[in-house]
Amino acid sequence: MKAIEIIKLLDQWASPNLIDEWDNTGFQIGDPEKEVSKVLISLDLDRKVFEKAVDENVQMIITHHPIIFKPLKRIAKLSYKEKLVYDLIREDIVVYNAHTNLDLAIDGVNDALANILEIKNTEPIKIIFEESLYKLVVFVPRDHANTIRKVLGEAGAGWIGNYSHCTYNIEGIGTFMPLEGTNPFIGEAYVLEEVEETRIEAIVEEKKLSRVVDEMIKHHPYEEVAYDIYPLKNKGKVYGYGRIGEVKERPLFNYLDIIKESLKVNKIIVYGNQIKTIRKVAVCGGSGSSFIHDAYRKGADIFITGDVKYHEAQYANELGLTIIDASHYHTEKVVLPVIRDYLEVNLGENTEIIIYDESSPPYVVY
């Protein structure tokens, strides 16, 4: 499979539309047309990850953190970053990363973190984007209705919760008169035609609308397709930073062991009241201190994140919100198996997916 096809699959999950304005992430290095049979997944891309990729004959590296975050003024064997980029290009390795878009994505970093910490009934701590929904209505000859319904479903229309290919159908009579220069599927020029048709309705997410319409027109028998698109007031998918939800009510002290065991972290830092019963838990993978007030407003008993600074913890303490710093690294690495599973399902057996499991935080806690 070509690298660009893998990139498109990842973009379908963690849409580039979700990338924060300050972020620099996505396809960063290599040939998009390169054939890929082996992929390495890692949280970061450093010299050790590069050497592992070379040893394993990997053609593509997928990371969470971008290797090129700030612009490079040159690609020369001088600085650490420049040398690494130079060597990646020399070895013809494709590099792609999903950063803030994977933080916000459904089933991304924060859902992975919430799931592993047994948090149920989750929602974002801070909503960034709510997807618009549309109703697509198309009129098709009855004997072609099954074909168009199948095309719509496979292109992504008619997806409601855990159900796919959802449509509503009404039978009726369509009328039209082909004019000069037309090449009608049914009828002839200047003759008013009456055709038994099916009106097919399906809900479509905004990000899928263009593809759905293109596929529908491509497979529709008519030269000129009659269809309508209506904006809906229904709420679409909600994307945002962090997650907040519920755990089984218990003393905080008992939950600390679950955090350490689930995240495979030996030490965590607890800021604020430790003698409390918890029910509502907020999380944000990586560095989530900027969402302390949002977690508080949502009613969180505790907030699990990383990279907590002194004054941020002090502010949370004033609010009565207990903060648990489980590290940037440990709260994000939980997404790596999720990326692997997603790719294995969508790429099949011809592409091998491996996780770089020799990484560690850039510090040691004694």
Image (cartoon, rainbow, N blue to C red):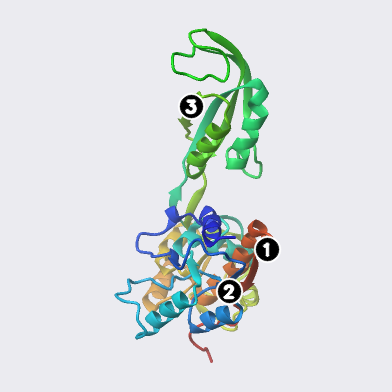
Image quarter in which the C terminus is found: bottom right
Asked where in the image residue 265 lies, by quadrant, the reply is: bottom right
In the rendered image, which residue does mark 2 sit on? 58
Q: Secondary structure at mark 3?
A: strand
Residue closest to the far left: 73
Q: Residues within 10 Å of mark 3 (few under 14, many from 20)?
A: few
Badge 1 or badge 3: first in the primary sequence: 3
Looking at the rendered structure, the kind of residue marked 1 is Asn
On screen, residue 298 versus residue 75, left or right, reads right
Image spot of residue 254 (x, y percent) = 65, 74
What's the residue at 52%, 7% (across, down)? 191
Asked where in the image residue 156 lies, by quadrant, the reply is: top right
333 to 195, vertically: above or below = below
Badge 1 or badge 2: first in the primary sequence: 2
In the rendered image, which residue does mark 1 sit on? 350
Looking at the rendered structure, the kind of residue marked 3 is Asp
Image quarter in which the N terminus is found: bottom right
Q: Secondary structure at mark 1?
A: loop
14 to 194, vertically: above or below = below
- Total numbered labels: 3
What's the residue at 39%, 80% (across, down)? 81
154 to 112, vertically: above or below = above
In the rendered image, which residue does mark 3 sit on? 228
Residue closest to the far right: 349
34 to 213, vertically: above or below = below
Looking at the rendered structure, the kind of residue marked 2 is Val
